[in-house]
Amino acid sequence: MATKRILIPTDFSENAIQAAEYALENLNYPDTEFMLYHAYQLPHYGAVISSDLDNILKDDRTSDMQKFEKTLRLKYPDCKIKGYISQGSLGQLIAQLTEKFVFNGIVMGTKGATNAESILLGSNATLVLKKTKLPLYLIPGGEKPVKAPKSVLLASDYQLNETNETFQPLIDLLKKHHSKLHILNLCDCSESNDILDAQSVLDEMFVSIPHHFHIRNKTDVKEDILNFVESREIDLITIVAHQYSFMENLFHKSVSKRISLYATQPVLILKD
């Protein structure tokens, strides 16, 4: 089996620790390497001061990374963990890393320096989402412990441009944890044949996975998703990035009053 490599951007916050633990708990396939990665930026001062400050920050962040690695290795002794730090913007450095290494996914926390009126996706998560085509796991902050994804939601509009390769990370995860998949139809299809055709395609893709289809009217995407997540006790929400209008509705400020319900669940974003 080929080596899998999972990238975990981190700022050493509590949310970042939760994200790392989620990856190590749930994505530790045979021959998997976990790359912890921290990017730091320098204030814009004079060249001499910036050079001195770079050394100070580098030493400080190196120490933080070493402590972080040690903590995770003690808790997950069977996992292969490597830590790296670099100076620069996170988005730019992520782009460079994904050109240099072959990754199977990125796992990161979603809440950093945000406030109650902020959208679900933090600025770093939004940046990474734009910069990479890799599967992206977004892990929200909170007091809930790391939990295996036993009940998983795939929200789909049934406009299927995806291939088996698109869904392979999800299929691997479902098989590993013997999970149940709920496929929620958010399409505006009026023809029953269109729905049956789409379900037939998905049946074939998830033939080895226990799965169930559910149909909802697409008049209010965010409410349908949130209600379904609550009623079915979903552990992981999966969406495909080409459904951009759907994602806008889901992450928009207008749902901030109810987003705490949604934000307690990790999200997997797949790219078609």
Image: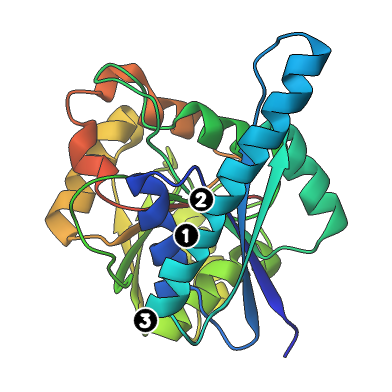
Distance (Cα) linking label 2 and label 1: 6 Å
Q: Are marks 2 and 1 in contact (CB under 8 Å)?
A: yes
- Residue 44: assigned label: none
The nearer-to-camera label among 2 and 3 is: 2
Q: Which kind of residue does numbered mark 2 sit on?
A: Asp
Q: Residue at x 68, y 70 (%)?
A: 5
Q: Is residue 50 left or right of residue 13?
A: right
Q: Nearer the viewer, residue 100 or 75?
A: 75
Q: Can residue 174 be seen by looking at this rendering?
A: yes
Distance (Cα) linking label 2 and label 3: 42 Å
Q: Nearer the viewer, residue 210 or 71?
A: 71
| Sequence-first disc among 2 and 3 | 2
Q: Which kind of residue does numbered mark 1 sit on?
A: Phe
Looking at the picture, the colour scheme in use is rainbow
Is disc 1 placed on a helix, strand or loop? helix
Q: Is residue 2 left or right of residue 208?
A: right
Q: Nearer the viewer, residue 46 or 199?
A: 46
- Residue 210: assigned label: 3
In this rendering, is residue 91 above or below 115?
A: below
In this rendering, is residue 29 above or below 53?
A: below
Q: Is residue 261 left or right of residue 146?
A: left
Residue that label 1 marks: 68
Residue that label 2 marks: 64
Is disc 2 placed on a helix, strand or loop? helix
Percent position of residue 147, x then y: 27, 68
Distance (Cα) linking label 1 and label 3: 37 Å
Q: Residue at x 46, y 33 (%)?
A: 247
Q: Residue at x 24, y 48 (%)?
A: 264
